[in-house]
Image (cartoon, rainbow, N blue to C red):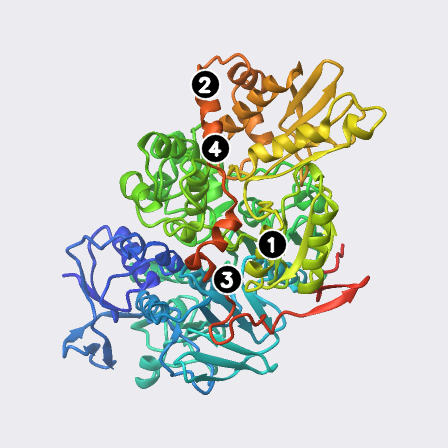
Amino acid sequence: MARTLVVVGHGMVGHRLVQALREKDATDQWQVVVFAEEDRPAYDRVALSSYVDNWDAAPLALAPHDDDLVTLHLNEQVVHIDREARVVRTTAGRAQGYDALVLATGSVPFVPPVPGRDLPGCHVYRTIDDLDGIRATVEAAKASGQAGRRAGMVLGGGLLGLEAANALRGMGLSPHVVELGPRLMPLQVDEGGAGLLKRLVEQLDLTVHTGTSASVIERDHRDRLVARLSNGTELDLDVVVFSAGIRPRDELARSFGLRVGERGGIVVDEGCRTSDEHIYAIGECANLDGTVYGLVAPGYSMAEVVADRLLGGRAVFPGADMSTKLKLLGVDVASFGDAHARAEGALEVVVNDAVAGTYAKLVVSDDARTLLGGILVGDASKYPVLRPLVGRALPGDPVSLIGPAGGVELSLPGDAQVCSCHAVTKQHIVDVVTAGDAVDVPGIKACTKAGTGCGSCVPMLRKLLSECGVEQSKALCEHFDQSRAELFEIVRSTGVTTFSELIDRFGRGRGCDLCKPAVASILASLDQGHILGRDQAALQDTNDHFLANIQRNGTYSVVPRIPGGEITPEKLIVIGEVARDFGLYTKITGGQRIDLFGATVDQLPHIWKRLVDAGFESGHAYGKALRTVKSCVGTTWCRYGVQDSVGLAVELELRYRGLRSPHKLKSAVSGCARECAEARGKDFGVIATENGWNLYVGGNGGFTPRHADLLASDVDTGTLIRLIDRFLMFYIRTADRLQRTSAWIEGLEGGLDHLRSVIVDDSLGICADLEAAMAKHVDNYADEWRGVLEDPEKLARFTSFVNAPGTPDPTISFREERGQKVPVLLGVPEVSR
């Protein structure tokens, strides 16, 4: 007769225990009874933030226990343990006997004793119900009819706090993150990495307050929340979310005499057994050697240990992998192993590129031969390879492993653990792929469980599939199976004009930060209305949302278009007057434009009103669109010039202004071979010859500069413009999301020769269509800022505070440098090696 195991709690760890036991219990020794406090079965709490994408809980659900020997009681809490009789009693009045009892009660969010913490609008961030409550508060605030930007505060700047801030942003709020410690993610990231992390997230419309806390939360006369911080700052809010850590759920154990730690947590031994030999504790409620682990991977290890013990094994807790990887608003953060170099004699190797926005640190042994840990911020692409190498011999010089050149090709040994959540090795994955049991990432997940925990190893799974010769999907994201190019053709051929219609007919869910801006760009490329129109505004990222680039202190830049760099004295005077009247920092750029920095969001319409009245229009510095067509002075003034470079640059910039594309576009026209406009460093560059123009394509600056390649030579102006029309439209239709022209050409089968055959020789017979599409764009162009100024509904977006329209954010501060105001610097981490 089967013995009875009672599991209290059906979170991810409790679910894992039941799953592991039933997989290993070949002779059905145990029947399992599970009591869940929530009214829904276990779900993926690690991916909880993704619930905000579509408010659909179904994708988070874990595999059900489809097993006659498992009974799950939902919404039923265990409230009593009779240890002598081995019986538990529940809120439903049920008495359930057991042979073994496992407490998997998890933890609860810690809420600091801030006055006002219980006010309506204050929430914790732990469960699906918590997110539903936050959503209800946000929607009520939006429905209040009050104008202006909605705001929320997250108290706690750890990993979960940043996730919560991201969720608030996804609901359309401007999040403030308040962290008592001196830096974000203090447990995972060091001072250098945290400095960069703060700068990166602040560029993405999050406001970070470190070294302070909330002193009081009050409700004002408008029924909004006001939080006063200990540094004197007041925040005007719609919602408050507490994410200041967790506390183990050990009250049941305390009540019935089990031993608990001084700082909480049910004390267990290396076999996860409590002070009662018939009772185990696993996950965030357990205290092992004085430590309560707050990650799912150690909980999964504990579940495996208990499953083994219940079947007569002698498994012990193997230790915890505290590695973490977060992708917040596109910002990568990863921490693994001995990230803070606590091992005796540990050495730190740091490569900090503040310009590129990346920070990488490796911690190595005192002889620099063994990798102990590391931190990656801004670019965590090497995390899947570096983390499994912890404790192993370094495959090369540490600097070369994290340097921008990437000089060492990292390769994992077969026994390296790729998925630490489920202890899956590289060899196991390779075996299931080469055996044909898995042909994609979902297949690997099904066969090995790799990638089903925190998900940070998924990129490595794709890499291993490629190494095994399996072709990878080009799906835009989890909501669309199609690539960006395929979606472009779908929108173009079907006439779909909204994201909701597109995802309803050709995708699933409600979209994410990847697919929404990509589809917005496609709709804009096809001239489907103003980008802040009712159906498109919600799709835009931060810069497009305010038609301006957000800067490091939360202000915005204003960049009027100056075609070809040619400008009259009258317009120069207008720009100077605007900069003077609004106190803006002015800078002449390398792209022959004048940038105006330091505008608050509510100032933007006033500034642009004066610029538009003076004949200026948007320079699209915020968008993935044409930025500039730079020029030299050409034959008009230069004694070496052979063609009118200024005239052509103005014509090209006006022709392609507002053209939305997969990545930003830059161009230049040089009046002779001396190349003063640096045309070969642009996406499309033109250099004058004695007989006409040479056209170059696929150049770019940035992190990996590349010279453009010659596509056509000595062509007349009409031919030149037709070729550029075709080149740009072919690129817009077929490139991947955020793929620059250089990478796009390199990725084409046949490269430049194929491109030339398509747009010069019309080998595909599509050139007339490409030209017609460009003609439509030219005919339908309208200045985006003029469109905002003429529409009261769009203008209403440009307000910082509900209670004080036109008032700049008080957290924004400036200092003076060389006679102009500049942002107060946030501090740049030092480089050490």
Quadrant assignment, res 256: bottom left
In the drawing, does residue 210 fall left or right of residue 484?
right
Q: Residue at x 54, y 60 (%)?
A: 205
Query: Residue 136, how many percent across, how many down?
Result: 32, 69
Q: Residue furthest bottom?
A: 115
Which residue lies under the disc numbered 3?
798
Label 4 element class: helix
Q: Amino acid at mark 4?
A: Asp
Q: Identify whether 53 is placed above or below 747.
A: below
Q: Looking at this view, is 537 or 177 the one in front?
A: 537
Q: Quadrant of the N terminus?
A: bottom left
Q: Quadrant of the C terminus?
A: bottom right
The dot on residue 377 is: 1
Q: Looking at this view, is 212 or 541 the one in front?
A: 541
Which residue lies under the disc numbered 4?
779
In the drawing, does residue 666 fall left or right of residue 119?
right
Sequence order check: which comes first, mark 3 or mark 2? 2
Quadrant assignment, res 671: top right
Marks 2/4: CA–CA distance? 16 Å
Q: Amino acid at mark 1?
A: Val
Alpha-carbon neighbours of circle 3 within 10 Å: few (<14), some, or many (≥20)? many
Label 1 element class: strand
Q: Amino acid at mark 3?
A: Phe
Which residue lies under the disc numbered 2?
768
Number of dots carrying numbers: 4
Q: Identify whether 373 is placed above or below 123.
A: above
Alpha-carbon neighbours of circle 4 within 10 Å: few (<14), some, or many (≥20)? few
Q: Looking at this view, is 121 or 335 the one in front?
A: 121
CB contact under 8 Å: marks 2 and 1: no
